[in-house]
Image (spheres, coloured by chain):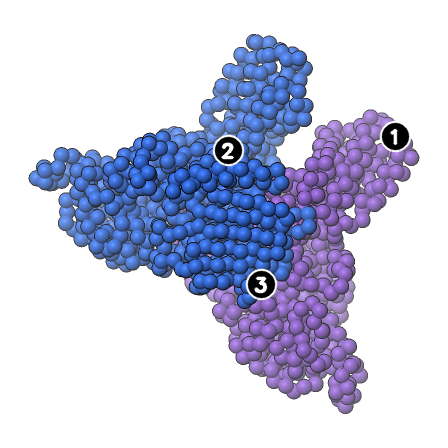
Chain colours: A blue, B purple
Amino acid sequence: MRNQLISSAIVLVATLSAAQSQRQLNLMPVPSTVQLGTGQLAINQSFSIAIAGFQDPRLKRGAQRFMSDLSRQTGMLLKQDLAQSSSATLLIHADHGTEEVQSSEEDESYELAVSESSAKLSATNPLGIFHGLQTFLQLVKPTGSGFAVPVVTIKDQPRFVWRGLLIDVGRHFIPVDVLKRNMDGMAAVKMNVLHLHLSDNEGFRVESKRFPKLQEMGSDGLYYTQEEIREFVAYARDRGIRVVPEFDIPGHSRSWFVGYPELASSPGPYKIEPDGPNSVMDPTREGTYKLLDKFIGEMAQLFPDAYFHIGGDEVDGGPWDANPKIQSFIHSHGMKDNQDLQAYFNRRLLKILTKHHKIMMGWDEILHPDLPKTIVVQSWRGQESLATAARLGYSGLLSFGYYIDLMWPAWRHYSVDPMAEDAATLSLEEKRRILGGEACMWTEWVTAENIDNRVWPRTAAIAERLWSPEGVQDIGSMYARLSEVSWRLEWLGLTHRSGKIQMLHRMAGSEDISALRILADVVEPVKDYTRISNVKGPWDFRAPLNRLVDAVSPESDRARRFGDLVEKYIQSRYRDQATAGEIRILLTGWRDNDAKLHPLLEHSFLLRDVTPLSQDLAALGESGLRALDYLEKSESSPESWRVQQLARVESSREAKADLLLMVVAPVERLIEASARQIH
Amino acid sequence: MRNQLISSAIVLVATLSAAQSQRQLNLMPVPSTVQLGTGQLAINQSFSIAIAGFQDPRLKRGAQRFMSDLSRQTGMLLKQDLAQSSSATLLIHADHGTEEVQSSEEDESYELAVSESSAKLSATNPLGIFHGLQTFLQLVKPTGSGFAVPVVTIKDQPRFVWRGLLIDVGRHFIPVDVLKRNMDGMAAVKMNVLHLHLSDNEGFRVESKRFPKLQEMGSDGLYYTQEEIREFVAYARDRGIRVVPEFDIPGHSRSWFVGYPELASSPGPYKIEPDGPNSVMDPTREGTYKLLDKFIGEMAQLFPDAYFHIGGDEVDGGPWDANPKIQSFIHSHGMKDNQDLQAYFNRRLLKILTKHHKIMMGWDEILHPDLPKTIVVQSWRGQESLATAARLGYSGLLSFGYYIDLMWPAWRHYSVDPMAEDAATLSLEEKRRILGGEACMWTEWVTAENIDNRVWPRTAAIAERLWSPEGVQDIGSMYARLSEVSWRLEWLGLTHRSGKIQMLHRMAGSEDISALRILADVVEPVKDYTRISNVKGPWDFRAPLNRLVDAVSPESDRARRFGDLVEKYIQSRYRDQATAGEIRILLTGWRDNDAKLHPLLEHSFLLRDVTPLSQDLAALGESGLRALDYLEKSESSPESWRVQQLARVESSREAKADLLLMVVAPVERLIEASARQIH
């Protein structure tokens, strides 16, 4: 299968190169094979869709949703009813339905053939149809003569069966409507697993009817009712998305202990507040398992997916060490350490999960020789950990490298491949155990307000990594397509672009945010765990997230493009006047912006701490302009000037207000370049 | 009462002038009296609200909604629960509840007193509380030290009891969620009547269980179910908004005849399609009244409001003239013309409405001496018509001047006063019959996608006209406050700003819409009925509304501000260099934009017809820059040059692609000014 995929990638590259000269298809994720023809299929108000072959209500709803999406995308009022005859513009044909509960092994492939008069979409089952319809929507563009889809034949299937997005609803609750629109976004880029991290120290987010103190005492009142869960599970299923629930135990479980302190390894009382005591579950008490059995039984009904995630990460051994009863349990059972105790806990858990017909999933830490090969390991540690598991016979998926809360640029996530590094050395059989990956949206610094901005559009790059052939690697192409996906995602109700603007208005408290936008467009939040390590005292999940760092995009397009311009200018050996002009306009805007922004910064407490950033930006603008003057005049800049400027630039590199100025490096490039005299 | 209001207005002007020097409150609508103190009340995470005095579930929901709005506005996680004690930051006190069905005569006044430690909001009933909470939300601003509300005492009541927004859901269906967010917008600016124009030739939009062919055959499948109606009526009531239904008869009623052709004055068959035949109801058939009795009985249950609007406008007499049976009815009943026949129809209708406990409302045309004084006239004709009705003893409200589909600038609607013109000469008693006014959103050119953009923010200016004291007239102040209201309205889910951007992306089919935005920002749709008169053949309500004219704001802020800059520069006798610089930047941008925009215009059929506009804008930029050169050099421009430029400018004044370039007049000013040599 791998060889087959690699040859697909070659076909793709060949056909795409041919295509690019004619037209940029802008598909994301890139399909396995694309054969572009000549001509186009007009998409006008007589457009219709019909279903041949297998039919069921879900497929019908999917077709109607497609018509409604197409209507929104084009601004044309289209008939939402399906056409009866096979004379429809787009004919859908699925061979059969899917399993009643979507499994991780379904065939998701499809074939889309577009001619000048009609289009046909075929697939084994509705999942392939859903993916093909998304491809079709991406193909619809305004042309000189109307909306149209190019004549094309696409054969497509995913590289990995598991293409997930984890949303941590424990630390900050994410309401159902926000989950739904994010699922729409997932479907648009062909992701198929929504992994919900449903409990953590800060909140228990699911209604349990058997143990109501879990949500009532273990949250601030924000949790999903069982009715809501059934609703969004059905919503997901309609879009070919599986919902995998995670209840993170035995660590990360303070919220359980608020209502049920007897579950903890240390005496309570507990509260969800940030200064509440931490603990871990007591694996030595039979009562723990009795409760878990009933609770998991209840949840197994609610979440139909075959997989059940029990977390298992970052178990703090302290509370176990401090509890003599637990210590004596360890010794009397012949265990050598806390890891053995966790493995014991997991074995007991596995029995419960198996009883309730669930496959156990957990983070790297659950890996232990005592556990059978049926469990699935999700790796936050990396391909080495994943490869080790695969060699031992365990299935797994990669999340290392896909932590979108770390504020990495899209290209960095894009370059992480579940099959790379250590995994590349696996045998074919071992490789088959690598199911795919999941983007992880941990929400320490994310709320319902800015989650769209954190997830999108970067997650689309991860979706492409997990769907498209391994050979699809061109970062420039990825960014071009990501830009287009980005504004298209706003049609689905996502607010990653519009929401930012509103947050800037809030900070400014006024209509005119033009100067603030200029600054906001060239900064990015600090990376990795810098922000949390800057917190003094305990991290407070209730603290408002309404600062500039919370509003700006994780990745600055403006800064990236400025860097590209500077490179282009340098590559031209300083001859490209048009590019120099563009660079000058940007630098001038930055130099002059601080004076305009200053009154706003003074006025609003939400902005005051970005004052030094604005000053740095002005200074960078000034330095860059001077460097550009030297370069344009083909004069060498004085060394003393350069030393001074580079020192100033260096100080602009430091994070301020948890933000990084992203134009530092290109300005530095200009200053350094100005040393050389070119003729 | 009028004298009292006028003196309030004087107090207001006095207190506001004092206030402006300290702080711009930016309240819209401007309250009756504002007494600004010193200091401020901090709004932080410990903010709480409590209810003293009258309590009911609606008031409680209102208070919770306020907390949720405040949370969204500030980005702070606030407790949604009400505080128990009177130690709350904001204490609410209502004396008693409202009537079970909100009447048009309820007391809507409130008093808000904010000190440095707390705030108290008092009102006779929850309606005043809802208004006061909106005022409070508008007062919350980021300051140097945190979010805060200034120390202030506000006593406020509406000038008119009827402050409405009509939405025509007949011509284009507007879904429930769009209605809801528009009601949120209405509540934010203290409007209290949502008037739904529920049927017209193109669609019948309400489910009737007694006459299901009305909606089934009389619409394209888009209508409100009875459950949805109950839902949005309850939603409205929660916000102090009355819902007044309109079924427009005997004209504008083609959609009735599709299912029930026997109601029409001419033989059918009928269809809702644009080329379907028009007709009017047959008022001579007893069967017509039997059906109307049962139908109105059903609707009277569904819409609890005391008022029931029967339209009655623009009755085409042709079908009556052409029907011999109807003609003989007219003669045999001693009527002299079709107007008498309509009056007969209305008298029969009045009997039915009275039986179902409804007050009859209609447009100007229903006014007839045969009808009793209990009916209410809504005037699309103007204050003269309204004053005539008032003199005859009829109550009425003004919509002339508030037709927001005509694409007028906000200042023009703002300057229309129900009490002005002929109405100003009425006696005090007659004036009391003028209940207020309604902004009218007719939807020939409006869909669910762009309705927010058509309604907001301009409707807020009309809301102020109907709420604030008569003396509140400053257009500059209105625009400053309107700008702020505009971005605040997007918090409520309205898309009048963000939606435009998405539509531009659709037209461009690409990410980079910067050049398109420059053009879009300085054009406005053609005014009045020009667009419909440009249509060749019958107007088709199914035609896509996805062109630039459908996306741009009805009023260009950019053009208005450019005009202000030019005036300022001329007033400075060409000495204000900073302003000249700002003018130059804008003109340069426009001059250079066409070249950048050109590839996009070529590429997309949705944009091709704006090509001449883009060229005009470039030419205006060039002419303006040359004029500015002369002015800055204090040189007189050659007359021949001016003649040539002014001819070019003249041709830019013509509408193209149903759009007007709004910077023509200021550029003309510059060219003309360049004739004079100033030192």
Secondary element at tag 1: loop
The image shows residue A200 at horizontal and vertical percentages of: 31, 44
- On screen, residue B144 above or below B542: above
Answer yes or no: is residue A390 visible: yes
**Residue drawn 44% across and 50% down?**
A109
Q: Nearer the viewer, residue A237 or A94?
A: A94
From the top left corner, tell me how far across and down residue A610 is, in percent: 50, 30
Q: Would residue A619 be visible to someone looking at this image? A: no
Query: Gap in Å between the C-alphas at discs 3 and 2?
Result: 41 Å
Secondary element at tag 3:
loop
Residue to which mark 3 is pinned: A87
Residue B335's image quarter? bottom right
Horizontal relation, residue A144 to residue B357: left or right:
right
Q: Which quadrant is home to the C terminus of chain B?
A: top right
Residue A599 vs A44, above or below: the answer is above
Circle number at residue B39: none
Q: x, y percentage for residue B72?
A: 48, 47
For residue B607, side relative to residue B87 (left or right)? right
Front residue of B334/A646: it is A646
Q: Residue at x 13, y 40 (%)?
A: A326
Q: Nearer the viewer, residue A503 or A122?
A: A122
Q: Disc 1 and disc 3: Cα gap in Å? A: 70 Å
Amino acid identity at mark 2 = Ile
Is residue B332 depicted above or below B223 in this figure? below
- Rendered-image quadrant of the N terminus of chain B: bottom right
Q: Mark 2 — residue?
A: A475
The local secondary structure at tag 2 comes to: helix
Q: Nearer the viewer, mark 1 or mark 3?
A: 3
